[in-house]
Amino acid sequence: MAATFARKTCSLVTCFPTRVSECFCRCTLLNVSKMHLRYKGHSKWQNIKFKKAHIDFARSKEFGKLSMEIITAVRESGPDVKFNSRLEGLIEKARTISMPKEKIENAIKSGTGTKDNPYEASLLEIKGPGGCGLLVQILTSNKVKTKNEMNTILRKNGGIFKDGGSVTFQYDYKGVISVEDFLYTEDKQNLSEYPDDDSVEKAEEVAIESGAENLFFCESQNEAKIIKFICAIEDTKKVHDDLSEKFPKKILSSELEYIPRTLVSLSEEPLQQAEKLIDTLEDHVDVVRVFDNIEQYPSTTCKLFGST
């Protein structure tokens, strides 16, 4: 809750009417002058403390958000930066904003699920409206409570839990490195269709050199052009490092994603129901990400290899 501070100004004439208006001896004037200086000094110190409090609050908020990102990265790919390029990037970011080493270490411990920080990562398999298959990554300190809340959401939105890999078998687990499209130059912006054959060919050469299995061109939510390079889990760090060397400052993210092997086409009613279900799941505080295999749904996750 933001606090509002009203600063009161005090008139020396109002506070000391008798002494100021009736007595003009040097001693009185000197005392008044000293009191005025003390007041100014006090005000300056209060302003400094006020500004410092705001800066400290902003830094604390930034540290807290980054800690949760580190916890999620550890949950997704483990605490070893050799195999977790996302964690490596977050640690580097934490250092650049002077996040205390102790806070970084505590976040990593929380991600691994220590006794004092019992966070647990789970993957929930869900059969959604129209037969679509959803995978929901969660990070929680109370798995039973979270799953019960998820169950309530599913009952209200036409979904049910599935177990035994009946949904995960429809997906491949891959490394996905997103890079700002380095081929979308000014002369390409006037093309009627992009990517053109030349851009695809050049991107494929980069993918082969880096050790990626496949790639695809897409746009972010703000319509920025992106190329996503797909690779085996164990090659994620290698591909990320190679692309970082080739295209410094253009790496956007390095993630592990479930990519659907086939896509499901839904009619209008189940599609609307599925969209509502996914939106509600993503709003839950313990949900990290939702993967879907719906052809018409504009997911932020990768659906390159799916076919109807």
Image (spheres, grey):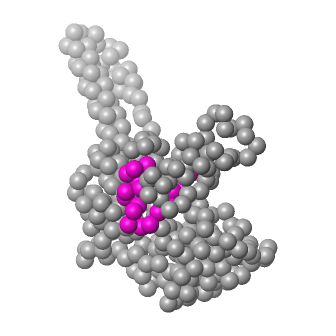
* Total marks in image: 0
Considering only vertical position in the picture, is 68 above or below 49? below
State whether residue 287 appears in this view: no
Most foreground residue, 63 or 45 = 63
Magenta residue check for 173 = no
Q: Which residues are magenta?
A: 227-243
Most foreground residue, 128 or 233 = 233
Residue appearing at x 43%, y 85% in the figure = 144
Residue appearing at x 54%, y 60% in the figure = 214
Residue appearing at x 38%, y 20% in the figure = 13
Q: Position of residue 9 (x, y in %)?
A: 41, 29
Q: Position of residue 294 (x, y in %)?
A: 67, 72
Q: Quadrant of residue 248?
A: top left
Most foreground residue, 211 or 186 = 211
Magenta residue check for 239 = yes
**Where's the C terminus, which quadrant?**
bottom right
Q: Position of residue 280 (x, y in %)?
A: 61, 72
Q: Position of residue 151 (x, y in %)?
A: 56, 85
Considering only vertical position in the picture, is 188 above or below 168? above
